């Protein structure tokens, strides 16, 4: 029986798909059987004749059938569902995650935006991202950018998660510039404020295919990276 992890962000367009790809590659390289699941994807793009994240997983990682619900409008899922009048069943998503856990060692479930995103509008209110995570009973990994605003965004996301009983297993920072005093201090400050393992600080990649592969190869020789990865994902990660 495997374990799913929900990849969430401190906001929209902060690099969850890059982080999901990073985790997929590095965990797969260790011999683990890894799956990606994208429960809700909005925003059909004519130029690729498809949906961005799902297209990325297919073209860059060779991962197919990652999506569950695709909705044409580029809006929050609950609004896209209302605009298209598409039938959506949250239990289908939960069942799919559980099926993948039976088949794979690790299941990376990428969310749409952050934890407070409404997924489905119901008669009595909204079924939120945090509700899906609780119902699926899976821990989360928070993704944040590294620059100005990172402290507030990460701390409030962490606080929201804890308020709603979610288990935060790790943090990954994107667009990290090791030469920036602001970036360095943001990470240092967040580590003191938030009780979660720092897994990685990913730089901005100019060529994602080549640069990410090289970056992972270098990380695999760094025990300071390997140790928290092993602790979070619960597997012996071999160099």
Image (cartoon, rainbow, N blue to C red):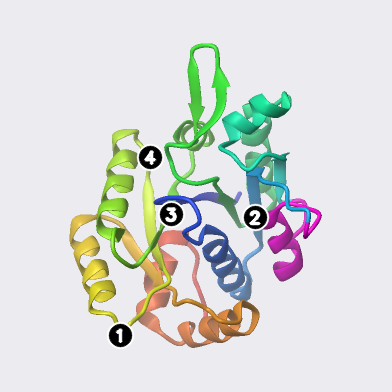
Image side of residue 24 versus residue 176, left or right: right
Question: Which residue is located at x 49 percent, y 70 percent?
Answer: 236
- For label 1, the crowd category at 10 Å Cα-Cα, with few meaning under 14, some 14 to 19 and many 20 or more, is few
Q: Nearer the viewer, residue 130 or 236?
A: 130
Image height of 125 relative to 29, above or below: above
Q: Of the numbered discs in the image, which one, if any, rests on residue 166? A: 4
- Is tag 3's residue or tag 2's residue first in the polypeptide sequence? 2
- Reading the image, the residue beneath label 1 is 179
- Reading the image, the residue beneath label 3 is 141
Image height of 163 relative to 124, above or below: below
- Reading the image, the residue beneath label 2 is 36
Residue 113 image offset from top left, x and y in percent: 50, 46
Separation (CA) of disc 3 from disc 2: 14 Å
In the rendered structure, are the residues bearing label 4 and label 3 in contact, judged by CB atoms less than 8 Å apart? no
- For label 3, the crowd category at 10 Å Cα-Cα, with few meaning under 14, some 14 to 19 and many 20 or more, is many
Image height of 172 relative to 215, above or below: above
Residue 98 image offset from top left, x and y in percent: 63, 40
- Asked whether residue 239 is in view, the answer is no
Separation (CA) of disc 2 from disc 4: 20 Å
Separation (CA) of disc 1 from disc 2: 33 Å
- Is tag 1's residue or tag 3's residue first in the polypeptide sequence? 3
Question: Which residue is located at x 52 percent, y 64 percent?
Answer: 19
Q: How many discs appear?
A: 4
Mark 1 vs mark 2: in front: 1
Badge 3 element: strand
Badge 1 element: loop
In the rendered image, residue 60 lying in the magenta stretch gets the answer yes
Q: Which residues are magenta?
A: 47-65
- Is tag 4's residue or tag 3's residue first in the polypeptide sequence? 3
């Amino acid at each position: 029986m495997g374990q799913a992890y929900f990849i969430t962000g401190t906001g929209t367009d902060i690099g969850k798909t890059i982080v999901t790809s990073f985790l997929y590659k590095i965990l797969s390289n260790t011999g683990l059987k890894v799956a990606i699941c994208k429960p809700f994807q909005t925003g059909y793009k004519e130029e690729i004749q498809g949906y961005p994240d799902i297209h990325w997983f297919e073209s860059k990682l060779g991962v197919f059938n990652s999506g569950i619900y695709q909705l044409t409008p580029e809006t929050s899922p609950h609004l896209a569902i209302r605009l298209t009048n598409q039938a959506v069943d949250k239990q289908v998503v939960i069942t799919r995650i559980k099926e993948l856990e039976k088949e794979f060692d690790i299941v990376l479930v990428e969310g749409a935006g952050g934890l407070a995103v409404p997924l489905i509008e119901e008669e009595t209110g909204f079924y939120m991202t945090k509700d899906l995570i609780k119902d699926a009973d899976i821990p989360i990994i928070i993704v944040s950018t590294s620059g100005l605003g990172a402290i507030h965004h990460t701390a409030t996301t962490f606080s929201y998660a804890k308020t709603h009983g979610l288990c935060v297993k790790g943090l990954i920072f994107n667009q990290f510039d090791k030469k920036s005093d602001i970036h360095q201090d943001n990470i240092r400050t967040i580590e003191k404020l938030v009780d979660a393992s720092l897994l990685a600080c990913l730089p901005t990649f100019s060529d994602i295919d080549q640069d990410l592969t090289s970056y992972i190869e270098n990380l695999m020789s760094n025990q300071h990276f390997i140790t928290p990865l092993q602790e979070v994902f619960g597997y012996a990660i071999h160099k």
